[in-house]
Image (tube, rainbow, N blue to C red):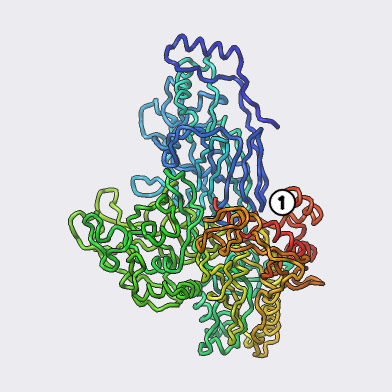
């Protein structure tokens, strides 16, 4: 049904002109129309792929709306009225023609169901005049007493208990009867209690979108779940929606006996300065009636199969947390032969529990499967269980960021940040002192790094590899750049510090040698032994009490308060997603007494500059950008399916455990140095009864059916590379040894995890498919970060982003794992190896959501691919996870998906 559009009538124009002549105060006649808008939302069902709704010539698209957890989504639009009146993201109050993006309760929400920030005077959500426009506001939510010029309203939020964040006006004057004070979400009463206590910077996900001159716009936000936002209460059993409301110029009512001239004049005055198009007018019924509603569905949140007693329990690495979250609902179904339980934990502690006695447990041990990236020592108690190691996932550590350019540089997200080993060493060692350096206007200098650059953006080494850094937010950051990371013992830290230690210049810096610009390691970290799996904050220097010092800082340690310590990789990614730093500062209390140490406020749009250490899957879920890390060949590389494949190519084998480990020193120029392989450490003795087969069968499922890319439950989500054929073979041998329980682990593998199988009929590719990835040797096509030219004449040297030629499979598609007639992994046109199975970029923003377009079938794909060069991600997979037809189709598209889909993240 088409929305009813206002139609200007001659009589209305004549009436407007007449009122103008009488009043003498109208600068221009306000639009008037007596056509009553009708409630006409457009609605979309949940989808794991991008979904678009259309109204007339306008469209709104949401990147994903199904099987959600707390994660980032992108909302974009076309054909909207360009925004006006705002000088930038820091001037939202003066914005006109905004596009409001909100998360709301239910699939047919009312305005009271929408989670929107404070409606208090002076902010962009101030009251709206609801009786100047048709249909007139019918609700009870009068913001003030009635005035001759009209009635203002504010719409409150309906809490989970059915009450509202609103109270009757306390004024006893009868003229205020029926008016309400609507409290801002998160606002506190006189006793310090929040009216809505779960409204924090971590749940404030409403967005005020700006539309560009061409009618397009985009906003990134995240979806809240019941866990962090119980008042909204979104879960697998309690649906919610994303609601998008464009704020437009609406026609004033014509003056009449029911709508006196004083109100008509007020409406016209509002139209003169565009106040009726401010963001706070989103609840105006004429605007609300044209809403776009995207229904949301949420993934199960349980980490155990509570209804089953036959689950295989896994404890350990968060590297596999997102994969486990996807796998668990499928394995918990009644149709699954075994259940699956998973508990996140740091890997060293998981190994310890694997070897810790527990007389109550069936096996006699506290844990029977640990998820790790490093083996147990032969001297540790767990060695008595004769553990074997089955590869179950390929991902890696990643440095993610939420960093923006300043408004003078055009705003928006910084497209790429390059980091080498020495720069990351500086971040780990608290070597940026912030304002406490030798020339900081009388502030006492930190004696541990007194002359170092204040923060990352002022470090000459960083500027050398990131020449645009002076245009980024955070240039004057007084805290010193802080990388969010855990003070804990973890295999990820060991992998990170191995990468740092592999670089001679980083080693020399840590041992006390200044970098070429004179920056030195923080004295408390000098000769810090690496590699290491643990991390601690060493710099406890406290600020002396000197004149001019900010209130509350005397005696405090700026490095300790500024540190962003996290208790999980998910926690760091979440903090960056919401731009709410984890560092603390002394805060003067409301009664002007000093002081309370509190978490700092969230960073506002246009000023965001956060960086975290996490995992590829958590960075993906949070919608963050990846930093490009320098490998041993000098190339700066981001994680992608291609770079993870090259990251494991040529991995060495630990002869004691049979575990592959990426070879940092010999890694291909296209390899990502943060690549990590996750293993299930499982016993080949001590399991009893049905346990051996339960764990063996679970491993077999994880390493075959669990390796199918997609966004549905049971699929391998974004942030992972599917296991290669040699890895699946090794995992199958481990599963057999676990089932046999004879105390004999399988022998170490002798194959490269990505076997080199060049196509003898192909020739090396001289241009990377698609443009933008220059080669260090000059074979890049298009324009790289520092590249130039269409025929591979690239001058970027070792500072190019994602250097090298993209592998181009030319062999026949191979069948998927466990499919009759399966062949080894395909080679590339350049003779370089490819991973087994379908190739899907780690970045969801490049790839789309799943391989669901394959339901059109290979013939349809070929036609669409030849015509458009891309495949639609909008159709779901043709069968349930693990169905043999689906596995065959997905594996059969290996060649095609690798050809048409790049393993590189968009930088915008």
Residue with the mark numbered 1 = 869
Q: Is residue 520 visible?
A: yes
Residue 737 sits above or below residue 557 on the image: below
Residue 119: image location, x then y, percent: 44, 38
Q: Could you say where residue 368 lies in the image, as x and y percent from the top left? A: 60, 80
Name the residue rendered at 77%, 68% in the picture.
Answer: 761
Which residue is depicted at the point 56% across and 70% down? 675
Task: Please state which of residues 38 and 827 is positioned toward the viewer in this rendering.
Answer: 827
Which residue in the rendered view is the most extreme toward the left?
Answer: 547
In this rendering, the answer to whether 489 lies above or below 801 is below
Q: Nearer the viewer, residue 454 or 513?
A: 513
How far across and down, in percent of the image, does residue 858 sit? 79, 57
Count the numbered circles shown.
1
Q: Residues within 10 Å of mark 1 (few under 14, many from 20)?
A: few
Residue 234: % across, % down: 57, 52
In the displayed structure image, the side of residue 541 where residue 724 appears, left or right? right
* Left or right of residue 539, residue 242 in this image: right
Residue 116, placed above or below residue 627: above
- Callout 1: SS: loop
In the image, 541 versus 348, the foreground residue is: 541
Where, quadrant-wise, is the N terminus in this rendering? top right
Asked where in the image residue 40 lies, by quadrant, the reply is top right
């Amino acid at each position: 049904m088409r929305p009813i559009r206002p139609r200007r009538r001659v009589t209305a124009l004549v009436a407007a002109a007449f009122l103008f002549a009488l009043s003498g105060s109208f600068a221009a006649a306000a639009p008037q129309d007596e056509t009553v808008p009708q409630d006409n939302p457009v609605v979309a069902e949940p989808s794991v792929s991008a979904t678009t709704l259309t109204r007339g010539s306008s469209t709104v698209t949401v990147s994903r709306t199904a099987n959600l957890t707390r994660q980032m989504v992108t909302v974009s639009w076309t054909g909207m009225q360009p925004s006006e009146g705002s000088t930038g993201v820091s001037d939202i109050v003066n914005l006109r023609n905004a596009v409001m993006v909100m998360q709301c309760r239910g699939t047919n929400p009312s305005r009271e169901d929408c989670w929107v920030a404070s409606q208090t005077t002076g902010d962009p959500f101030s009251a709206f005049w609801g009786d100047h426009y048709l249909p007139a506001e019918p609700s009870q939510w009068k913001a003030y007493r009635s005035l001759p010029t009209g009635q203002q309203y504010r719409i409150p939020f309906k809490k989970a208990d059915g009450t509202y964040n609103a109270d009757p006006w306390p004024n006893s004057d009868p003229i205020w009867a029926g008016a309400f004070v609507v409290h801002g979400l998160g606002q506190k009463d006189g006793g310090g209690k929040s009216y809505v206590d779960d409204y924090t910077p971590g749940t404030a996900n409403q967005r005020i979108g700006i539309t560009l001159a061409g009618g397009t716009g985009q906003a990134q936000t995240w979806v809240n779940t019941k866990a962090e936002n119980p008042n909204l209460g979104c879960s697998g059993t309690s649906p919610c929606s994303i609601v998008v409301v464009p704020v437009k110029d609406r026609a004033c009512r014509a003056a009449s006996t029911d709508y006196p001239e004083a109100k008509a004049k007020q409406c016209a005055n509002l139209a003169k300065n565009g106040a009726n198009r401010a963001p706070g007018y989103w609840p105006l019924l004429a605007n609300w009636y044209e809403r776009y509603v995207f229904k949301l569905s949420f993934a199960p949140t349980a980490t155990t199969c509570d209804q089953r007693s036959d689950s295989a329990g896994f404890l350990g690495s968060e590297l596999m947390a997102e994969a486990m979250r996807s796998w668990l609902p499928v394995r918990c179904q009644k149709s699954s032969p075994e259940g699956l339980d998973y508990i996140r934990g740091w890997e060293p502690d998981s190994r310890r529990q694997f070897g810790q006695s527990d007389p109550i447990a069936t096996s006699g041990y506290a844990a029977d499967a640990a998820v790790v990236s490093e083996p147990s020592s032969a001297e540790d108690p767990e060695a008595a269980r004769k553990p074997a190691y089955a590869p179950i996932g390929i991902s890696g550590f990643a440095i993610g960021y939420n960093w923006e350019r300043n408004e003078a540089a055009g705003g928006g997200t910084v497209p790429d940040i390059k980091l080498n080993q020495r720069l990351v060493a500086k971040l780990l060692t608290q070597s940026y002192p912030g304002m406490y350096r030798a020339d900081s206007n009388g502030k006492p200098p930190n004696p541990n790094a007194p002359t170092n650059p204040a923060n990352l953006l002022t470090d000459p080494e960083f500027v050398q590899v990131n020449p645009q850094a002076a245009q980024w937010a955070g240039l004057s950051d007084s805290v010193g750049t802080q990388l969010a990371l855990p003070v804990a013992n973890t295999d990820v830290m060991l992998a990170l510090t191995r990468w740092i230690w592999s670089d001679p210049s980083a080693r020399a810096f840590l041992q006390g040698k200044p970098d070429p610009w004179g920056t030195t390691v923080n004295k408390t970290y000098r000769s810090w032994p690496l590699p290491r799996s643990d991390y601690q904050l060493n710099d406890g220097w406290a600020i002396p009490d000197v004149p001019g010092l900010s209130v509350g800082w005397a005696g405090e340690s700026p490095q300790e308060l500024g540190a962003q310590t996290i208790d999980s990789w998910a926690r760091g990614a979440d903090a960056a997603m919401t731009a709410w730093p984890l560092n603390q500062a002394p805060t003067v209390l409301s009664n002007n007494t000093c002081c309370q140490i509190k978490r700092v406020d969230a960073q506002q749009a246009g000023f965001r500059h956060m960086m975290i250490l996490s995992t590829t899957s958590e960075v993906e879920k949070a919608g963050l950008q990846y930093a490009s890390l320098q490998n041993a060949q000098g190339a700066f590389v981001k994680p992608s399916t291609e770079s993870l494949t090259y990251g494991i190519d040529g991995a060495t084998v630990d002869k004691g455990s049979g575990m592959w480990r990426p070879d940092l020193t010999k890694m291909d120029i296209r390899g990502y140095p943060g690549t990590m392989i996750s293993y299930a450490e499982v016993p080949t003795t001590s399991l009893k009864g049905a346990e051996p087969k339960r764990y063996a069968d679970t491993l077999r499922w994880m390493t075959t059916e669990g390796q199918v890319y997609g966004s549905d439950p049971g699929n391998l989500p974004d942030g992972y590379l599917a296991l290669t054929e040699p890895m699946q073979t090794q995992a199958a041998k481990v599963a057999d040894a676990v089932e046999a329980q004879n105390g004999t682990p399988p022998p170490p593998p002798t194959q490269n995890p990505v076997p080199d199988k060049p196509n003898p009929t192909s020739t090396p590719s001289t241009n990377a498919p698609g443009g933008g990835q220059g080669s260090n040797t000059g074979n890049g096509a298009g324009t790289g970060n520092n590249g130039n030219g269409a025929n591979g004449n690239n001058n970027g040297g070792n500072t190019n982003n994602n250097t090298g030629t993209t592998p181009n499979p030319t062999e026949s598609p191979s069948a998927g794992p466990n499919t009759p007639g399966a062949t080894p992994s395909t080679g590339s046109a350049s003779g370089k190896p490819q991973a087994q199975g379908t190739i899907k970029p780690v970045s969801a923003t490049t790839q789309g959501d799943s391989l669901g377009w394959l339901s059109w079938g290979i013939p349809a794909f070929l036609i669409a691919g030849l015509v458009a060069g891309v495949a639609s991600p909008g159709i779901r997979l043709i069968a349930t996870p693990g169905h043999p037809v689906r596995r065959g189709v997905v594996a059969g598209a290996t060649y095609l998906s690798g050809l048409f889909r790049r393993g590189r993240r968009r930088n915008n």
